[in-house]
């Protein structure tokens, strides 16, 4: 790397110096030629003024007068911008004289035109004579300035040429020395690297065959190869130790996984036993038979309303005691709601509140977890419209958009304050009543069923009502709610 970088720096330096010198020389030559051309054009315009003025004075031609004014404007606008390339006292004096004589030249030329128009032959003859004299002086000064700049620039050209030749000779010498140095460095470094690298390759080949008991590599230098050799010795010593430790850990992890699997199986068995214990607290068959007997008795006594009431309770109880991890359609959920509200209206009277259900037929068979809507409706009843004497209304609306199925449960009750809404949005537990399934339980079961977060929103305005919105994805990654989910929330 050092040899390579040294050669690059030398080559770059020589090339840059040579390029800079040549560029400087070319720039000076271009500037001189441009300035000389500008001075020549200026001198030519001065001559054109003299020629046009002379013809105008002789012929009094309007074309010659227009030609005169054209060149007059060229000279008048250009002589103040004349410059010198080679900065010397004589050049500055020549340039100053040119500008002064040009100004006087233009004044005399303008006077000659005025005298000619005034038919003052003596006046324009005298002014034209001054014009000729200034013209001769200006041409001489311009030629002298161009000649001086060429002479001075020639000297600079020789100096820069000598410098370029010197740089090229010096660069050639440095290049030869750099090549010799690089060859010697390459031979020495190659020999120094080859031996320890060969030992390192042989040791690596030995380890690749699974032989980890080998003597450490000798480390006799203090360079990068020595660092690699030392690291290789440490690696070889550690590999054997690590292989033994990995084997022991593998055996231990296998035993732990087996034990964890057994523990998990025991936990699932325990949860399932707990669920069965909770469901067994009420014997469904006994309750159903008892309620059916009540229905038959009410019919025999011509108590049709009582029979209908008991039948609705039976259906509600049968629906509620289904496995909590099963899924149902929106149609089944809303049918269960109608049974539930029939019982409530019988209990509270039909004037206090009413239930409105609107379901898009296209999503009536959409699958949701069991007892998803009823806890929300019950919450709206208890915390919203139960305290109203009359006119309470709970509306359940299920509809869809391009990506989601949306279920809104709205009431016109007392509403909730911002703190209660915040608690519900944050997922804090606020239990229901009849089912024991609160909004928190509904939120969690929806999350497990659809595999997504933020499926439930709560919006409420005090004294105006509350809306609980479920936003369920159509692209359903639904999974069954785990069987060990406690139905009592």
Image: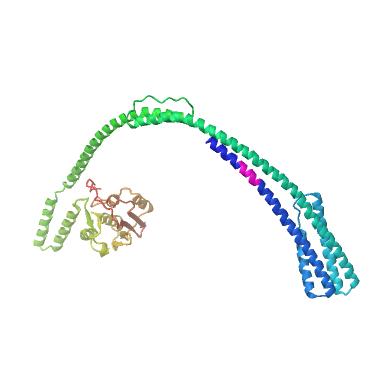
Give the residue at the far left of this rendering: 300
Is residue 45 visible from the viewing direction of this image? Answer: yes
Which residue is at the front of the view, 183 or 353? 183
The residue nearer to you, when weighing 267 against 430, is: 267
Residue shown at 77%/72% (left/top)? 66
Is residue 435 found inside the magenta-colored segment of the image? no
- Residues shaded magenta: 13-20
The structure residue drawn at horizontal position 18% and vertical position 54%, both measured from the top left corner, is 317
* Camera-nearest residue between 84 and 324: 84
In this rendering, position of residue 239 left or right of residue 362: right
Foreground residue, 172 or 17? Answer: 172
Query: Residue 235's spot in the image, x, y percent?
Result: 38, 30
Judged by its main secondary structure, the magenta piece is helix
Residue 11 at x, y percent in the picture: 59, 41
Q: Is residue 125 above or below residue 28?
A: below
User: Residue at horizontal 33%, vertical 30%?
Assistant: 242
Q: Can residue 355 be seen in this view?
A: no
The picture places residue 71, in percent across and down from the top left corner, at: 77, 67
Where 471 sits versus 263, above or below? below
User: Image quadrant of residue 398?
Assistant: bottom left
**Residue 265 figure quarter:** top left
In the drawing, does residue 387 fall left or right of residue 167? left
| 449 left or right of 224 in image | left
> What is the x, y in percent for residue 436?
24, 50
């Amino acid at each position: 790397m050092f040899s390579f970088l040294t050669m690059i720096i030398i080559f770059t330096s020589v090339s840059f110096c040579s390029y800079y010198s040549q560029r400087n020389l070319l720039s000076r030559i271009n500037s001189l030629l441009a300035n000389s051309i500008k001075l020549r054009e200026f001198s030519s315009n001065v001559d054109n003024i003299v020629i046009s003025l002379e013809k105008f004075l002789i012929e009094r031609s309007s074309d010659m007068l227009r030609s005169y004014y054209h060149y007059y404007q060229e000279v008048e606008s250009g002589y103040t911008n004349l410059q010198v390339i080679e900065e010397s006292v004589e050049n500055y004096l020549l340039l100053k004289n040119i500008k002064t004589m040009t100004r006087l030249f233009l004044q005399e030329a303008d006077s000659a035109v005025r005298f000619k128009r005034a038919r003052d032959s003596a006046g324009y003859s005298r002014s034209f004579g001054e014009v000729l004299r200034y013209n001769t002086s200006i041409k001489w000064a311009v030629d002298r300035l161009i000649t001086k700049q060429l002479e001075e620039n020639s000297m600079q050209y020789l100096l820069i040429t000598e410098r370029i030749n010197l740089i090229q000779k010096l660069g050639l010498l440095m290049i030869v020395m750099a090549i010799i140095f690089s060859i010697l460095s390459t031979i020495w470094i190659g020999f120094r690297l080859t031996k320890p690298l060969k030992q390192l390759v042989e040791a690596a080949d030995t380890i690749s065959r699974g032989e980890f008991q080998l003597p450490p590599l000798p480390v006799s230098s203090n360079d990068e190869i020595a660092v690699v050799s030392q690291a290789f010795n440490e690696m070889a010593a550690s590999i054997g130790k690590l292989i033994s430790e990995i084997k022991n850990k593998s055996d231990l992890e296998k035993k732990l996984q087996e034990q964890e699997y057994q523990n998990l199986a025991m936990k699932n068995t325990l949860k399932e036993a707990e669920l069965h214990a909770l469901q067994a607290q009420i014997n469904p068959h006994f309750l159903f038979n008892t309620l059916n007997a009540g229905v038959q008795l009410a019919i025999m006594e011509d108590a049709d309303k009582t029979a209908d009431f008991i039948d609705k309770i039976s259906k509600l109880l049968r629906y509620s005691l289904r496995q909590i991890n099963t899924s149902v359609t929106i149609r089944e959920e809303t049918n269960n709601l109608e049974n539930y509200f029939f019982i409530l209206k019988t209990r509270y009277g039909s004037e206090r509140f009413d239930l409105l259900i609107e379901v898009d037929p296209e999503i009536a068979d959409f699958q949701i977890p069991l007892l998803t809507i009823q806890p929300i409706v019950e919450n709206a009843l208890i915390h919203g419209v139960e305290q109203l004497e009359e006119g309470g209304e709970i509306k359940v609306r299920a509809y869809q958009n391009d990506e989601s199925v949306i279920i809104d449960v709205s009431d016109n009750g007392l509403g909730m304050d911002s703190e209660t809404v915040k608690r519900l949005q944050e997922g804090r537990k606020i239990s229901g009543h009849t089912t024991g399934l609160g909004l928190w339980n509904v939120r969690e079961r929806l999350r497990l069923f659809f595999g997504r977060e933020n499926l439930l929103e709560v919006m409420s305005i005090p004294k105006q009502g509350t809306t609980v919105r479920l936003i369920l994805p159509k692209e359903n990654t639904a999974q069954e709610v785990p069987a060990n989910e406690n139905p009592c929330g």
